Image: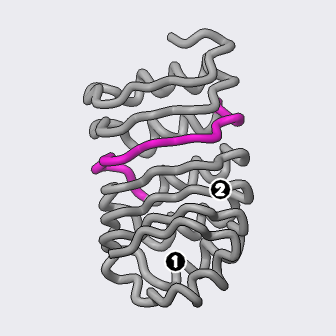
């Protein structure tokens, strides 16, 4: 599928991206740094785990709108992709605080969008902050169960924060 040297892959809005395709990505795209799967709704946690196992250099992952993605999928990415810097989980509605706990091991994560994730709470945000000290951009828009919305408190949690989206 991919060339061995492929650095970026964009399959945005290709709704049929599933386990077979992502297994091929994980097996052949060892140097992949950017994977954009915006509005690809049909892949599973298992499919994403193939990417996590094979794409150790992944820095940018966009899974916006992945309706079937759960905490297990994010956990596999957090474990397998230590260089992750940018993650868009907007409207991945099944994610909970466990996803943020897993992401706390991503020491280089600097841009995170969890827009619209109603299951996230202050506890998950605190877990994220315990390990992710490089967060510069954070989108918490629509995270109605995150109650700590004081800018000063969020800046203490994320000292490098300079772009915050919160409505």
Which secondary structure lies at badge 1?
helix
Which secondary structure lies at badge 2?
loop
Q: Nearer the viewer, residue 117 or 165?
A: 165
Q: Which mark is residue 95?
A: none
Residue drawn at 45 percent across, 50 percent down: 88
Give the extent of the magenta segment. Answer: 54-70
Q: Is residue 54 left or right of residue 75?
A: right
Residue drawn at 62 percent across, 81 percent down: 155
Colour scheme in use: one colour
Circle 1 residues within 10 Å: few <14, some 14–19, many ≥20: many
Q: Is residue 60 above or below residue 114?
A: above
Residue 68 among those drawn in magenta: yes
Q: Which mark is residue 109?
A: 2
Residue mark closest to the camera, 2 vs 1: 2
Q: Position of residue 160 (x, y in %)?
A: 69, 69
Residue on which the image places disc 1: 124
Q: Position of residue 124 (x, y in %)?
A: 52, 77
């Amino acid at each position: 599928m991919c060339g061995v040297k492929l650095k970026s892959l964009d399959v945005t809005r290709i709704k049929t991206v599933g386990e077979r395709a992502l297994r091929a990505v994980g097996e052949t795209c060892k140097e992949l740094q950017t994977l954009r799967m915006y509005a690809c709704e049909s892949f599973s946690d298992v499919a994403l785990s193939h990417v996590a196992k094979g794409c150790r250099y992944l820095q940018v992952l966009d899974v916006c709108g992945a309706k079937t993605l759960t905490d297990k999928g994010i956990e596999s990415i957090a474990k397998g992709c230590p260089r992750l810097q940018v993650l868009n989980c907007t409207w991945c509605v099944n994610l909970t605080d466990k996803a943020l706990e897993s992401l706390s091991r991503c020491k280089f994560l600097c841009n995170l969008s969890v827009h619209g994730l109603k299951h996230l709470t202050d506890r998950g945000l605190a877990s994220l902050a315990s390990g992710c000290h490089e967060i510069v951009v954070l989108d918490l828009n629509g995270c109605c169960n995150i109650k700590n919305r004081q800018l000063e408190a969020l800046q203490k949690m994320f000292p490098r924060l300079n772009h915050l989206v919160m409505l």
